[in-house]
Image (tube, rainbow, N blue to C red):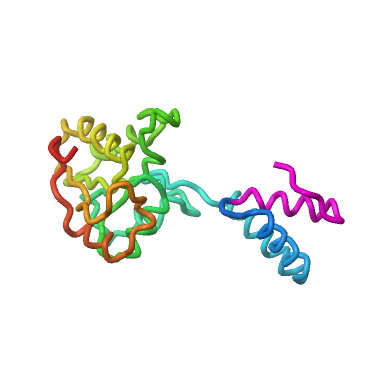
Amino acid sequence: MKFESTSSKLLDDAVEEFAKLPGIGRKTALRLALFQLQRESEEVNMFCKSIFDLKDKIKKCKICHNICETEICEICSNSSRDETLICVVESIKDIMSIERTQQFNGLYHVLGGVISPMDGIGPSDLNIKELMGRIEDNNIKEIIFALSPTMEGDTTNFYLYKKLAKYDVDITSIARGISIGDELEYTDEVTLGKSIMLRTPFDDERL
């Protein structure tokens, strides 16, 4: 989208890039660009370096697909975590939300999305095979479904339930203290924490 020009092409380019960020409109983008213009060169260089480092040095954990700076994230490498318990989430943001509750001490598995035919996302686009591999290769006793209670989330829960039924593991789901249709990342910490603690067995009757 092309915006109304300012008096400088360089400023226009900066504004256009800031405006590509989610939730940033033209006025906010202009304000951010002008703010950077007023800062010391060293501060701007540090800002730019942090963005470059974020893009170039952040990796995906080869076990759970969380973000990290090493091959294995801090959660997966933490010997004090319960390695028999895996909480399945849609995105990295959901891990952050659950960790803030301080009510979960197991491991995670990031699917990388949910099944959504309308968006062209099918089971093969998600990290489902990797989850099954973790169950097969490790002494996993329980899988917790912690996907947002949306139509897509429930569809994904049901698909996973059918795929994992052959394994000797307990399959549970976070309690529905979260309103139907709400995104997990926007749920308050108290409600989310209680949902983790009060998780219930997952079966066909929940759908």
Quadrant of residue 129 within the rendered picture: top left
Up-down: is 165 above or below 148?
above
Front-most of 187 and 46?
187
- Residue 42 against residue 154 in the figure, above or below: below
Left or right, 167 with respect to 102, comes to left
For residue 35, above or below residue 24: below
> Looking at this rendering, what residue extends furthest in the front direction?
4
**Camera-side residue of 159 and 77:** 159
**Drawn side of residue 146 relative to residue 31, left or right:** left
Residue, x 66% and y 60% (percent of image)?
28
State the residue in front, 4 or 170.
4
Where residue 39 sits in the image (x, y, percent)?
A: 75, 70
Residue 110 pos. (x, y %): 37, 45
Where is residue 84? Give x, y as percent: 21, 50
Residue 47 appears in the picture as rendered: yes
Horizontally, residue 170 falls left or right of residue 125, namely left
Of the 4 image quadrants, the one containing the N terminus is top right
**Residue pushed farthest right?**
7
Q: Residue at x 22, y 62 (%)?
A: 194
User: Can residue 168 be spotted in the picture?
Assistant: no
Q: Would you say residue 95 sits in the magenta stretch? A: no
- State the image coordinates of residue 87 (x, y, percent, origin top left): 27, 49
| Residue 20 lies in the magenta stretch | yes
Total marks placed = 0
Q: Residue at x 38, y 34 (%)?
A: 126
Residue at point 87% right, 56% down?
Answer: 7
Give the side of residue 103 with respect to residue 203, left or right: right
Quarter of the image with the C terminus is top left
Question: What segment is highlighted magenta in the picture?
Answer: 1-21
